[in-house]
Image (cartoon, rainbow, N blue to C red):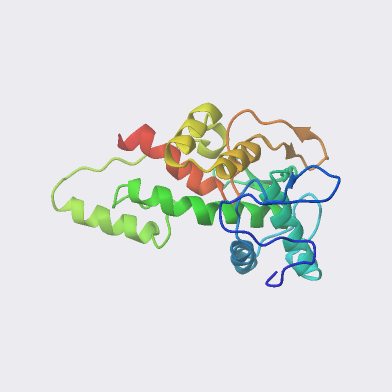
């Protein structure tokens, strides 16, 4: 990833360039979207550290690593050109202790890396807008931080409200979520890929493909930050 390929072109950030060829029209050589190759490498390292199972293509992280440079270059090239299309998400039913099942969506390794690229760019822009004592799906915060906030407030109030949001990931309205994304970023490629991930079909254990018109897969890299972005507009404002 660190070395440029022979057919790649180095250009100033944000600028489109062209080369004159005798007898031919000028063709733009710049990618539509400026995405750092180093960001893709960083995303892979984070995905690898998080481990996880294979998606619908049955490719493990170890198998992806066997041809790492070409795989990462291919992903970067497609994302930068706007041609990257997320594959279906593998459905894994997880039994609940209280009965029933929780549906976990497992993207492919390559798709998890792509989602991580977007997360690394998008998360810093939305983090400052969240309440300081909001601990859900946030970097460097956990359930223990939420317990700490609760302990402090118990000294001031003798009551507590506890509730669970049923099926949050499965039921977020796409139109409202995309409005929130658009409000917090003007990046065309972030908007494009978030929309594609939201509508990527789910592949059931029997191979059937189920289209999606709401929700974001629980198990996707980008899903927690999307849920975190949606919830403040529902509860905190």
**Residue at 33%, 55% in the rendered image:** 146
Count of numbered circles on the image: 0
Residue 167's spot in the image, x, y percent?
A: 53, 36
**Residue at 19%, 51% in the rendered image:** 153
**Residue at 31%, 37% in the rendered image:** 236
Residue 123's spot in the image, x, y percent?
A: 46, 52
- The extreme right residue here reads 23
Q: Classify residue 196 as left or right of residue 185.
A: right
Residue 158: quadrant of the picture: top left
Please tell me which residue lies in front, 44 or 187: 187
Residue 67's spot in the image, x, y percent?
A: 81, 68
Residue 132's spot in the image, x, y percent?
A: 29, 52
- The extreme left residue here reads 156
The quadrant of the picture occupied by the N terminus is bottom right
- The correct choice, above or below, for 115 with respect to 226 in the image is below
**Residue at 63%, 49% in the rendered image:** 16
Residue 56 in sight: yes
Q: Classify residue 2 as left or right of residue 143.
A: right
Residue 68: quadrant of the picture: bottom right
Residue 73: quadrant of the picture: bottom right
Residue 100 in sight: no
Please tell me which residue lies in front, 140 or 208: 140
Please tell me which residue lies in front, 172 or 113: 113
The quadrant of the picture occupied by the C terminus is top left
């Amino acid at each position: 990833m660190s070395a440029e390929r022979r057919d790649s072109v180095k250009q100033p950030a944000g600028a489109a360039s062209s080369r004159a060829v005798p007898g031919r029209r000028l063709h733009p050589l710049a990618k539509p979207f400026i995405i750092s190759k180093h960001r893709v490498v960083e995303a892979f390292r984070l995905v690898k550290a998080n481990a996880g199972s294979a998606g619908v293509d049955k490719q493990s992280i170890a198998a992806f690593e066997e041809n790492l440079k070409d795989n990462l270059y291919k992903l970067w090239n497609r994302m930068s050109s706007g041609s990257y299309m997320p594959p279906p998400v593998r459905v894994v039913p997880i039994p609940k202790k209280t009965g029933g099942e929780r549906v976990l969506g497992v993207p492919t390794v390559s798709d998890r890396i792509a989602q991580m690229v977007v997360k690394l760019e998008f998360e810093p822009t939305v983090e400052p807008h969240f309440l300081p004592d909001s601990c859900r799906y946030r970097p460097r915060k956990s359930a223990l931080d939420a317990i700490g906030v609760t302990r402090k407030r118990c000294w001031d109030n003798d009551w507590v409200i506890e509730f669970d949001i049923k099926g949050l990931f499965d039921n977020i309205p796409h139109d409202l979520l995309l409005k929130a994304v658009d409000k917090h970023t003007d990046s065309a490629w972030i908007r494009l890929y978030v929309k594609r991930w939201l509508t990527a079909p789910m592949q059931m254990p029997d191979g059937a493909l189920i289209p999606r018109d709401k929700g974001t897969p629980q198990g996707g890299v980008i899903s927690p930050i999307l849920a975190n972005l949606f919830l403040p507009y529902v509860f905190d404002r």
